[in-house]
Structure formats: C-alpha cells, structure tokens
Image (tube, rainbow, N blue to C red):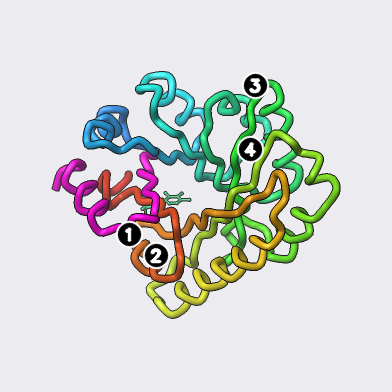
Amino acid sequence: MSITNNLKNIKQSLPENVTLIAVSKTKPVSDLMEAYETGQRIFGENKIQEMAEKHEEMPKDIQWHMIGHVQRNKVKYMASFVSLIHGMESFKLLKEINKQAIKHERVIDCLLQIKIAEEDSKFGMSPKEASDILQSQDFSALKNIRITGVMGMATFTENTAQIEKEFKLLKSTFESLKELNTENCQLQTISMGMSGDYQLAIACGSTMVRVGSSIFGKRN
Ligand SMILES: *Cc1c(COP(=O)(O)O)cnc(C)c1O
C-alpha cells in the first residue's frame, strides 16, 4: 500500500473529533511530501534537530508536533515554530519552554505527559504531580506556555485489557485536571493511541492519535 492510500484509509476511519498526527520520524522528506500532497498538515517527530531540518525544507503551512522526549538544551532549536509539544514531564522543562517562548514572543502549547504504563522505561508524571504543578504559583507565572491537554503511552504489550486500563486512567486524569481551568491551562486534548492501538484509544476517549508505521511503513 502507498502512503497516500494508507493515509486515506486511516483518515476515513477516524471520528471527526479526532486529530491525526502523521508520525514521520526517521522518514525522508519525500515520504512526508507524499502525505502532504494527500492533504496531511500535522506531522510528529521525536528528535528536535530532525524536526527542525524538515521544517526548514518543507512548506510552511505544516504544524510540527514534538512527540518525543525533550532535552532542555535543545528547546531553542524548535521554539520559533513548534506547534505542540506532547512530552512535558517536569516543571523544569516547562520553565525552559516558557523562557524560549518569550524570546520568540509567542505562546507555546504543551501537553502534560502522564505516566500510565507500568513499564519503567516510559517517561511522564503521575496524575498527582500534574495536578500539583497546575495549581502552583510558579506555574501560573509561566505566561508564555499553555497546557492544552495530556498525553500518554500505554505499555508495549499484547494484553488489550492492560492497555485499555491505562488509556482509561489517562482519560480520568484528563477529566479531573480539566477542572483546573486557568489562564495558561485549558485542557481539551487527549493524545493517546499509536498504529497498534489507536482504535482502542479512541474508544477510550482519545482526541489525538499519533500514527507512524501504519502510514509510512515500518521504520529501520
Ligand atoms: C514513534 C511514536 C509513535 C508512532 O508509533 P507507530 O507505532 O509507528 O504508529 C507515536 N507516539 C510516540 C510518542 C512515538 O515515539
């Protein structure tokens, strides 16, 4: 199947309220351009430098989402253009994003990454940590970031019941954090679901799915 066909099929299967992020990490610009020609305008990358290079080369109406682990010393390379950062996992990182956003006189939208998987290898904060941060004075002082939702990754397993349990945890975390509506925190997005589990994620309340290999094929 071609990228165009894959993309069309997936788009058709998504409910209207679900946004599709085409995860293009490791893929060449020619592959991304094929998706672009099909109408895709949101791409997800997990390395800041790779995303910055692709942003340079590609049309400027693309929205670039950083979906990977963010190193603080590299935030400056994406601060001018990144459209959404999915992996906010500490207050320190939020502070750095805010600092870089000020330099570019913009507000950067971010999702808090919640650790829903049992695996230790996955990043993220606990629901309690997220709630504490959002209610802190220090957080309300960060005027150049806006928290617009939560993101999570389920355990890498065949056990559907376990994945479902983790997705439901993210959904309920979202619902409780949503109450804390402040100037720089307006939750509307639940980023969960990848190629292998996005249908289940949508059934559990996802509003944003990050799909890579089902569009672009396997990565090396
Ligand atoms: C790579 C990646 C994806 C996409 O994974 P696929 O299984 O190829 O769809 C989604 N989310 C994150 C955070 C990723 O790093």
Determine the image quadrant of residue 130. Answer: bottom right
Q: Given contact means CB atoms under 8 Å apart, are the residues at marks 2 and 1 in contact? A: yes
Quick check: is the Cβ at mark 2 less than 8 Å away from ligand 1? Answer: no
Q: Looking at the rendering, which quadrant does residue 220 occupy?
A: top left
Task: Give the image location of residue 23, x and y in percent.
Answer: 38, 44
Measure the alpha-carbon separation of dots 1 and 4.
Answer: 34 Å
Query: Is residue 161 placed above or below 192 in the rendered structure?
Result: below
Residue range (magenta): 1-25
Which of discs 4 and 2 lies nearer the camera? The answer is 2
Give the camera-side residue of 214 and 110: 110
Whether residue 117 is visible, yes or no, is no
Q: Secondary structure at mark 3?
A: loop
Q: Which residue, given by chain and number where applicable, does mark 1 sit on?
A: 15
Circle 3 crowding by C-alpha within 10 Å: few under 14, some 14–19, many from 20: some
Which residue lies at the image location 50% right of the left edge and 36% below the top edge? 47
Give the labeled residue for mark 3. Answer: 104
CB under 8 Å between callouts 3 and 4? Answer: no
Q: Earlier in the sequence, mark 4 or mark 2?
A: 4
Q: Is residue 49 magenta?
A: no
Between the C-alphas of marks 1 and 3, the distance is 35 Å
Q: Which residue is mark 4?
A: 71
